[in-house]
Amino acid sequence: MPTDIAPGFVDPVHESQTTFRAVLDALAEPGTIRPIAGVATAPAPLAPTAAAVVATLCDFETTVWRDEALATPAVDAWVAFHTGAPRVADPREAGFAIVAAGETAPGWETFRLGADIDPSTSTTVVLQVAGFGEGRRYRLSGPGIETTREIAILGAPADLAARGAENRALFPRGIDLILASPTAVVGLPRTTRIEEIA
């Protein structure tokens, strides 16, 4: 394990509470952009905002999977040191998954989809994206959205809408998605309808 592990939050109590609230609000109101500061330093290619989400939501009881791009000794050491979360090689065993980029994201069926009697056992996927406000545009609807909400995502999977439809059809099973840009998070829970706008 590297001995020069990058620091996490500067003010752990306040910043983790702020991040937790931002993620909760993002999932409660899908498509809303919730700014977060991120951690002080994170080993590339782990983005500071994604690192903040992982550091806030994961602990020694939370299994974590990361994709090939994030499979570096520095990232593994950072996550282990700041969360204590055990790493798993099989995404179907992960409580949380961290994916470096939408363009290379595996299909959502790759992850643990939960069970009808306990849908909370599914994987929450933290997906790093380039930003919000530009890129592919989507119209969202469903719980937490009064009518519809529109959002542009730069760096989302090209087939995000199709993935969303397949995921939603599994309800109450399915993954929940947290998009992490360099400055903010957006939640797309399994109940959200996602339509790409031409």
Image (spheres, rainbow, N blue to C red):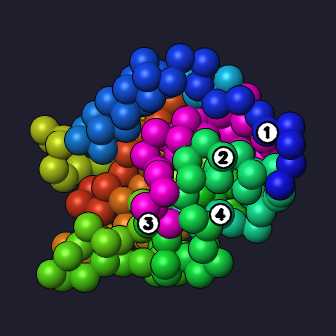
Does the magenta-highlighted stretch encompass residue 51?
Answer: yes
Question: How far across and down, in percent of the image, does residue 172 sit?
Answer: 19, 73
Residue at which label 2 appears: 81
Q: Earlier in the sequence, mark 2 or mark 3?
A: 2
Residue at which label 3 appears: 95
The amino acid beneath tag 2 is Phe
Residue 38 visible, this angle: yes
Q: Describe residue 179's horizontal placement relative to residue 98 as left or right.
A: left
Q: Alpha-carbon distance for marks 2 and 4?
A: 15 Å
Are there few (<14), some (14-19), or many (20+) residues within 10 Å of tag 2? Answer: some
Mark 2 and mark 4 in contact? Answer it, CB < 8 Å.
no
Q: Alpha-carbon distance for marks 2 and 1?
A: 8 Å
Q: Which mark is residue 26?
A: none
Mark 2 and mark 1 in contact? Answer it, CB < 8 Å.
yes
Quarter of the image where one finds residue 165: bottom left
Q: Alpha-carbon distance for marks 2 and 3?
A: 18 Å
Q: Alpha-carbon distance for marks 1 and 3?
A: 24 Å
Task: Label 2, secondary structure: give it.
Answer: helix
Mark 2 and mark 3 in contact? Answer it, CB < 8 Å.
no
Q: Which mark is residue 66?
A: 4
The amino acid beneath tag 1 is Ile
What residue is at 36 percent from the left and 59 percent from the top?
Answer: 176
Task: Label 3, secondary structure: give it.
Answer: loop
Q: Alpha-carbon distance for marks 4 and 1?
A: 18 Å
Question: How far across and down, in percent of the image, does residue 184 sit?
Answer: 51, 30
Q: Earlier in the sequence, mark 2 or mark 1?
A: 1
Task: Label 4, secondary structure: give it.
Answer: strand
Question: How far across and down, in percent of the image, does residue 115 sit?
Answer: 25, 82
Residue at which label 1 appears: 5
Mark closer to the observer (2, 3): 2
Magenta stretch? 41-63
